[in-house]
Image: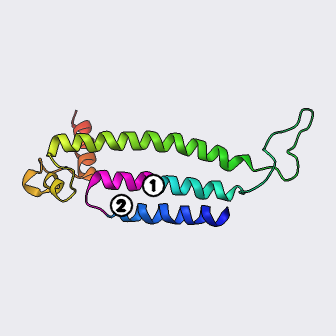
């Protein structure tokens, strides 16, 4: 059981690394989801895999029975699943919005947004902007 779980985690992380290196944003997003799943399985494996007693406290008792599973990794995974799903949905919407704006989901074709000829007015450095606003306050 542990060997199959370790092999599954390794395959998920390897596939995620391969997909994250793609220039295509949907593939990168799928790699991100696979990486989250692999990490969740690794955390689950850290909480002990195999035959054990469920992490339930008996009525009248104040501690878990000996050999009970650790409930902390399970709680962490539940939280991570919810956060990961929300993040994946947000990233999917961003990819769809980028496709609508640029007409492509390739990262190489999207770099036009960062070219200097498309740049807006130069930004004022924070220190210079703060000095000017202080001088204006003194003049007023």
**Quadrant of the rendered image containing residue 15:** bottom left
Name the residue at 14% across, 51% down.
122
- Report the quarter where the C terminus lies: top left
Q: Main secondary structure of the magenta part?
A: helix
Q: Is residue 60 above or below residue 91?
A: above
Q: Residue 109's spot in the image, x, y percent?
A: 15, 56
Q: Is residue 96 left or right of residue 114?
A: right
Query: In the rendering, which numbered label is found on residue 124?
Result: none
Q: Position of residue 124 (x, y in %)?
A: 20, 50
* Residue 87, x across and y down, in percent: 42, 43
Q: Quadrant of the N terminus?
A: bottom right
Residue 91 colored in magenta in the image: no
**Residue placed under numbered mark 2 in the picture:** 19
Count residues near mark 1 (Cα–Cα under 10 Å), then give few for <14, some for 14-19, many for 20+: many
Q: Is residue 18 above or below residue 27?
A: below
Residue range in magenta is: 22-33
Query: On the image, numbered disc 1 is attached to which residue?
Result: 34
Q: Is residue 78 left or right of residue 118?
A: right
- The secondary structure type at the circle numbered 2 is helix
Residue at position x 78%, y 44% in the image: 55
Instruction: For mark 1, give the secondary structure.
Output: helix
């Amino acid at each position: 059981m542990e060997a199959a779980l370790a092999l599954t985690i390794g395959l998920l992380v390897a596939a995620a690394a391969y997909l994250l290196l793609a220039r295509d944003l949907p593939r990168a997003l799928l790699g991100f989801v696979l990486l989250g799943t692999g990490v969740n399985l690794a955390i689950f494996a850290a909480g002990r895999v195999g035959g054990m007693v469920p992490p339930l406290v008996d009525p009248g008792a104040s501690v878990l029975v000996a050999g009970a599973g650790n409930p902390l990794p399970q709680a962490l995974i539940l939280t991570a699943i919810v956060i990961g799903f929300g993040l994946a949905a947000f990233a999917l919407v961003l990819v769809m919005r980028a496709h609508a704006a640029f007409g492509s989901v390739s990262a190489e074709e999207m770099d036009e947004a960062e070219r200097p000829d498309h740049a807006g007015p130069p930004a004022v450095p924070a220190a210079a902007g703060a000095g000017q606003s202080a001088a204006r306050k003194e003049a007023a």
